[in-house]
Image (tube, rainbow, N blue to C red):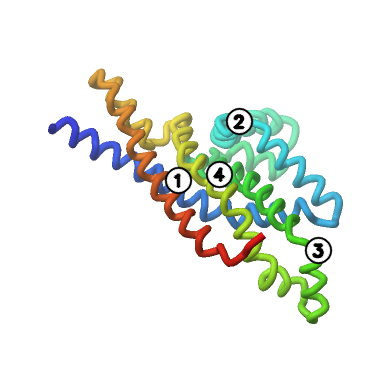
Amino acid sequence: METFLNVTLDLLNGFGTTVKLFGLTLLFALPLGLIFSFCSMSKFKPVSALMKVFIWIIRGTPLMLQLIVVFYGPGLAGAWAEDLLAVTDNALIQWIATWNGLDRFPAVLVAFVINYACYFSEIYRGGIESIPKGQYEAGQVLGMTKTQIFFKIVLLQVIKRIIPPMSNEIITLVKDTSLARIIAVYEIIWSAQVYIKSAGLIWPLFYTAAFYLIFNGVLTVLFRKIEKKLDYFKG
């Protein structure tokens, strides 16, 4: 019983990091994804083309690889910059050579925010483009500006349409936080693996499933309630 309590306390400590990473990723990725979607839909072709290529790269490569690049990339770039300092004293090259990169948790957060912002941007884009053009035209007839049309007519309908795919991505995010251990961030899976190495206990690793299931269960109920509240938007 004492072992079970100790394991639970350690897993709760690791789960705190999991929840922190989850919350901060949503906090930054949701608005950033909206900005990305606007850029990808921009009528200025260089901006939209560049953003589409960036989103394609991020969505087309594993998040694990992106974590490694964000954390270890600055060190590799620094070594490359040090070699260049032999032939140039450029200020930017000097800064790259002396920059040590991000700490582990900030590096994980940056990788997660960029990755999920790209996925969210495609969901936003699909939701915005699904709104009939007639609604934009109706707003213009009423003398509304493009900003007013977006926030007063389009936005709530977009939210209604994107809740199901967005909820799927957010639940996936909960599980993806386990990848943080790749660069030794102390999240719940890492907490459980410690017992395998130190005490030969494997059950704490399976015990982590209970934390994920409860957390995802709460999110599922929350999203269902949000969908019901938005049921007045039909079609």
Furthest residue toward bottom:
143
Total marks drawn? 4
Regarding mark 2 in the picture, which secondary structure is present there? loop
Q: As shown in the figure, which amino acid type bears the numbered disc 2? A: Pro
Q: Quadrant of the C terminus?
A: bottom right
Tell me where residue 114 appears, x and y as whole percent. 61, 45
The residue located at (74%, 36%) in the rendering is 88
Q: As shown in the figure, which amino acid type bears the numbered disc 4? A: Glu
- Tell me the distance, in whole angstroms, between the alpha carbons under discs 2 and 4: 15 Å
Circle 2 residue: 62
The residue located at (38%, 39%) in the rendering is 212
Regarding mark 4 in the picture, which secondary structure is present there? helix
| Mark 1 crowd level (few <14, some 14–19, many ≥20, 10 Å Cα) | many
**Front residue of this view, candidates 82 and 120:** 120
Circle 1 residue: 21
Q: Is residue 114 left or right of residue 197?
A: right
Tell me where residue 11 appears, x and y as whole percent. 29, 37
| Mark 4 crowd level (few <14, some 14–19, many ≥20, 10 Å Cα) | some
Closer to the observer: label 2 or label 4?
A: 4
**Front residue of this view, candidates 162 and 24:** 162
Circle 4 residue: 169
| Mark 2 crowd level (few <14, some 14–19, many ≥20, 10 Å Cα) | few
- Tell me the distance, in whole angstroms, between the alpha carbons under discs 1 and 2: 18 Å
Q: As shown in the figure, which amino acid type bears the numbered disc 1? A: Leu
Q: Is residue 192 left or right of residue 223?
A: left
Earlier in the chain: of badge 3 and badge 1, it is 1
Circle 3 residue: 133
Q: Tell me, yes or no, whether the two marked residues, 1 and 2, touch with CB atoms within 8 Å.
A: no
Earlier in the chain: of badge 1 and badge 4, it is 1
Closer to the observer: label 3 or label 1?
A: 3
